[in-house]
Amino acid sequence: YNPLASRWMAVAVAADAPNAPCLFYSLLNTVISFDPSNSSFGGVPYSNKFASDTHVKLVELSAQVLCVLLDCGLSGDPVPCVNRYDEPVVRVSYAYKNGFNIFRVMLARINSGKDLATLYRGFVRLLRNTFESKNTLLPSSQSRLECYQELLILLWKTLEENPLFLDFILTRCDVCELVVPLCYLMYTSRKDSAQVGLVHICTFILLKLSGERSFGVSLNRPFRTKLPCDLPLFSGSHADLISITLHKIIVNGSYRLVSLYSCFLTIVSNFSPYWRSMSLVSSVKLVNLFELFSSPKFLYSGEKAYRHLALLLEIFNNIIQYQYNGNQHLVYAIVRRKDSFGRLASLTLPKAIHQCQKQFPSSERPEYDADAADAAQVAALSIQDVDEHGNPIDDEDDATSTTNGRDTATSSTTVSGTGECFVPTEAWLTELRASLPLETVSRLLQHLVPVVDDMCDRKNGVVDEIEILEVFKDITMVGLLPVPHAIVIRKYQPNQYTSIWFTAFMWGVVFLRSQKPPIFDGQCIELFQVAGEDK
């Protein structure tokens, strides 16, 4: 796919395109200013059942047209340029550059605080409609927008094109207002194979946001919103909401989301150093994930399956070393599951081979293949390791744990093409031990397990959980743990593979939303596969 190949689009987005600024701001205002809760008759319940939906269709079509116009060409230059009359202009040399897109330039150059606030409030209002329309006292009394996928594409485009917008929502807005609808859409779409793309784009947005320190700090705000879904009850912050949502997707989601597991854990790892107080539910679920990924079914499903464990251990280490006070629930959950960490630390090659052969006889293939998990069909992610101040970290060991889409796709083709099951080797075991940072958790267990055992002995095995948490709260780990490691944040890096994925996703959304009447011939489409539904 060549984003510069369309001659029609090249004319439509050229610097001298007639009325381009008027069209851009008209489309953007039509979408952003719409209020679904007050769209007809002043917000009277059920008024949407009697009123025309012309305005809603206008918003949906405006969002689609804007997505198409912002997709082609190259990224816009965010640095403003003015003439001698202080009017915004585009340099001639830049305007005639191949791939120039006036709409991407205008989006990138929105720099007024008022305009950025309007953009943010519009995205929040429209995305929150996905669950607020189901949270009404009177059932179905508020209309629900169906163009939320187009809104997510526009949000992604704005985050990518306009660096001031990302900084604005993280420093001057409550970014948690965006996190709630993203988690809700991911949670409710986790089992629907037709909504895999929706979960992907929500994941990419969270990954983009999690690369900033301000995002991790903001997630400590308490979560009090009631969502119309079977989300486990918990009392905690928005960081808990993200972790519980991602846990549910992993243990009870579509198999086609397996390739996102590393992205899920990377998101949590990025904000874990700033997670002040983890809820009991989140603590138990994260440790449960460690047990799940360290089980033979997952650990021996592929040569690189242990990368999930490495990210989980990094999460535990970040919290233990930087946020020990206030996270007694996680510490207690780790102590209770000490055997899982001990088995992994004492793993030997004969034991690994025996467990692998027992779990996967030669006649069976793994149900979960960590290497061939549909990776070639996922947007290839390029993630760069940086420190807390944004400086790149050149570390070969760290680089192996990042998700490089091209390498992943190549290795998955090799593994799945051979048809051979993975068998542990000495080299694999050596690499596993070098990749898993177990020292911090091991030191923690060496000190706290005897404390808990002593309490149990003194009280004949009857110890209240609250008493143990109080003891953990009073214990200091200063001098007992290794020297705190540097905070590593994995930032999303734009690349051609993600650009192609977003283009395919956008046109897939447009195709599915244009079936009444159908204006596209599915048999002629090559950018994505069109599969008919069996009846």
Image (cartoon, rainbow, N blue to C red):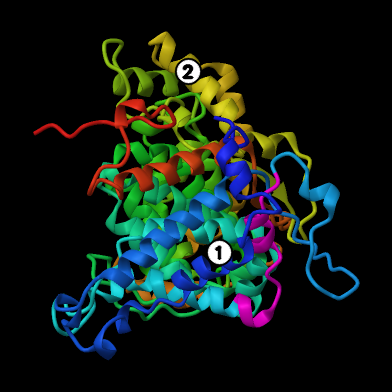
Q: Secondary structure at mark 2?
A: helix
Give the magenta-colored segment's residue range.
100-116
Choose top left, top right, bottom left or bottom right for residue 254: top left
Q: Are marks 1 and 2 in contact (CB under 8 Å)?
A: no
Furthest-left residue in view? 535
Q: Is residue 109 magenta?
A: yes
| Quadrant location, the C terminus | top left
Q: Relative to 98, does residue 206 appear above or below in the rendering?
A: below
Q: Nearer the viewer, residue 496 or 507?
A: 507
Choose top left, top right, bottom left or bottom right for residue 209: bottom right
Residue type for callout 1: Leu
Residue type for callout 2: Thr
Percent across and percent down for residue 384 are 69, 45
Left or right: where 352 falls relative to 480 = left
- Looking at the image, tell me whether mark 1 or mark 2 is earlier in sequence order: 1
| Mark linked to residue 413 | 2
Q: Is residue 18 visible?
A: yes
Left or right: where 294 falls relative to 108 = left
Disc 1 marks which residue? 23
Q: Nearer the viewer, mark 1 or mark 2?
A: 1
Furthest-right residue in view? 84
Q: Residues under labels 1 and 2: Cα distance?
A: 45 Å
